[in-house]
Amino acid sequence: MIELDRAGRSFKVKRNVVHAVHDLSFTVAPGEFVGYLGPNGAGKSTTIKMLCGILTPTSGTVRVAGLDPSRKRTVVARRIGVVFGQRTTLWWDLPLKDSFELIRLLYKVDRKDFRVRLDELVETLDLSTFMKTPVRQLSLGQRMRGDLTAALLHAPEVLVLDEPTIGLDVVSKNSIRAFLQRVNAERGTTVLLTTHDLGDIERLCKRVMVIDHGRMQFDGTLDELMAGESSLEEVVTRLYTAGAQ
Amino acid sequence: MRIPAHGLLSCPHSPEVHTILLYARLVRYGFRKHATYVAAALAGAFTNSVFGILRAYVLIALWQARPGLAGYDVLDAVTFCFITQAFIGPMQLFGGGLTIPERIRSGDIALDLVRPASLQLCSLAEDLGRAGYLFVVRGLPPTILGALLFGITAPDNPGAFLVSFTLGVVVSFGWRYLVALSVCWLLDDRGTMAVSLVLTTFFSGMMLPLGIFPGFLGDLAAALPWAAMVQIPMDVYLGKADIWQALGVQALWVAVMLGLGALGTRLIRHRVVIQGG
Amino acid sequence: MVRTYVLLAWTWTRAAAAYPVSFAIMTVLGFLVAGLDVAAILVIFSNTTTLAGFTRDQVLFLYGTSNVAFALCDMLVSNLDRISLHVKSGTFDTMLIRPVSTWIQTATDRFLITRIGRVLQALLVLGYAVTALDLPWSRLWMVPVMIGCGFVIFSALWTLAGALQFVLTDAPEVSSAFTYGSGQLTQYPFAIYGREVVRGVTYVLPLAFVNWQPGLYVLGLPDPFGTPEFMRFLGPVAALVLALLAGLAWRQGIRRYRSTGS
């Protein structure tokens, strides 16, 4: 479903070339739930932006559902759902309801399908009380639930989540995790999740990838990563600090 | 992290002697705050210059058809055009420049109003600093460009012009301050902003010299406060007005505007601090 | 494309219509602000009967044709010049994850139907000028053509100005010198400008084809700069070339886009 083959992205910063992502290769099969870890500045967001077609890779190839996102941006966009925890993809001044309506128009979702999906999402994520509230007045937890809804209204095959639980309280976190698990299990949606919250990983991901300095450091199951140790935090800390040296 | 919109947090609980130091510091603060937006200021200067060239051609065509109109010759008209373009930045002739509307909307204005220094004078000091910076960065480019492309005259009496220009900035501040305070009573300030834009561009002389306005319209424009922003300083620049009379009229408008502003400040203090917004 | 545009614009209009009073006020004020330029023309002609050989009604005709096209652009595409805001705030990333062209999304973002006040004002002036000048029907067919070409030329300029902002994110105001400057420039007969300026806005930036060249045809006047007669009819060609260039520039701008932040 997602394939990267020696993909790289470099930026020119004042005559120096910085490789945000370097020769990165991995494959995610349909229906997988993959955690994508790495310290700040490791290249996680750059990878995700290449998957969505926001950034064009400077080397190698990226394929989502068999298509090159930077060339076939609009086609890929219909098959992928994206959530950025740090910022909303909703319209700041519009009520949630109008934002969803805009999404329907942008993604050309059939009116009937839209109705069914929206009703279902509104119910599971408990949105009904603030559907008429402008996005800027929503709390972080409410906004994140709105963003998740927006990302799923066009029934994407792939869901990419960039730190979806950042800044949320325990209750909101748990409800979002339960929801993601359901989406993956019931709809078979492929999920790629970046996070700094190891609880997300323990609860949700069978497979984990760790990236640092734009290169893959580890790719395997959560059990392999733990390798008999008891604390995920210690394992990850060791990986991150090893990368720094 | 944004810098607090007014330097009021730095206002000391003032023994009277410190008052002048405080305002001097606020002037410097306003200057330095705007100095961080060099690119934006230069872009503004570029736009003002382009529009200066376009306006100059219109005025040249008019003065070729009517030499000596309103007591100006072609050179005076071109000078008028470029110097008034140079006024746009420092006098904020298209409105804005103050952070008060944002602060009223966010409620932060209450913090400013409980400080022991006058909101109006602190704002004025900061605005003068802003004007000083933009006088250089947005004022000089159109002036130099006008001089190179078309030729302009030097000020008749530079000292008097500087005084008159500064008074013009204060009148402009006084007007913008009143417009800014109106947000307190009107939810949507875009309306007042647009009305202010129309009145200021039309009646200040920014668009065309007030001397060519026909009959009653000309007399009306000359009697309104906006003339004290652009037309009067320009007449002083070109040596077309009696200096003392011109400065007197400006001083009068300064007094009126600041007086009304003080009244307005008292009203919003009542509304915000006592009634709790 | 048109359908998507209309649907998006309609959503924004519906959201704005929730506040009917400010909606009405903004329409009226748009009308007023736009009236300033006409007021300037009227004041000028209260002092003279001709400006560079053109009468008041002829100038109003040129103003009207240029301004109908310009005001339509102001309403329909001028939001393109907010691109640097989108880049800075990260909302441009969001537009890139949507399956619709970024051009349409940027142009419709915060679409304001209230800007129609300006279009109405320009149409009113144009209507007056056409009636007062008593122009022959045999040449009036050019008026809709020139408004169409003007619309395409101004839209292309806005697109170019938007593309420029991918490079000049810190100084978006530069682009308004081109867009609003072009609107201002075409309000008056080009006869008032210097020969070099007119050459520049004929052969480099083809503003002469908005209303000057075709306008001379409608008014039945010779070009004071002596360009040949066939130039009066080149508007569509100029519009097409500029539109293609603008499209390329927009694509280049997006390729240069470096999403910042995490």
Image: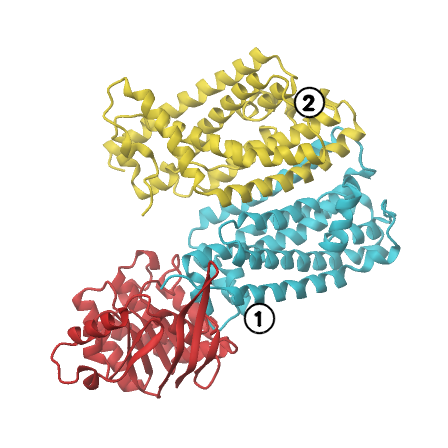
- Chain letter of the residue carrying label 1: C
A155, above or below B52, in the image:
below
Q: Quadrant of the C terminus of chain A?
A: bottom left
Q: Residue at coordinates 25% horizontally, 75% vertically from top-left?
A: A124
Q: Which residue is mark 1?
A: C1
Quarter-of-image position of residue A127: bottom left
Is disc 2 surrounded by few (<14), some (14 to 19) or many (20+) residues within 10 Å?
Answer: few
- The reply to the same-chain question for discs 2 and 1 is no
Q: Position of residue B2 (x, y in %)?
A: 33, 45
Q: Residue at coordinates 58% horizontally, 33% vertically from top-left?
A: B140
Q: Which chain is red?
A: A
**Residue B52 shown left or right of residue A204 in the figure:** right
Amino acid type for the residue under numbered disc 2 = Gly
Q: What number is the disc on residue B215? A: 2
Q: Nearer the viewer, residue A62 or C118?
A: A62
Quarter-of-image position of residue C214: bottom right
Q: Which chain is yellow?
A: B
- Is residue B207 at least partly visible in the picture? no
- Is residue B133 at least partly visible in the picture? yes
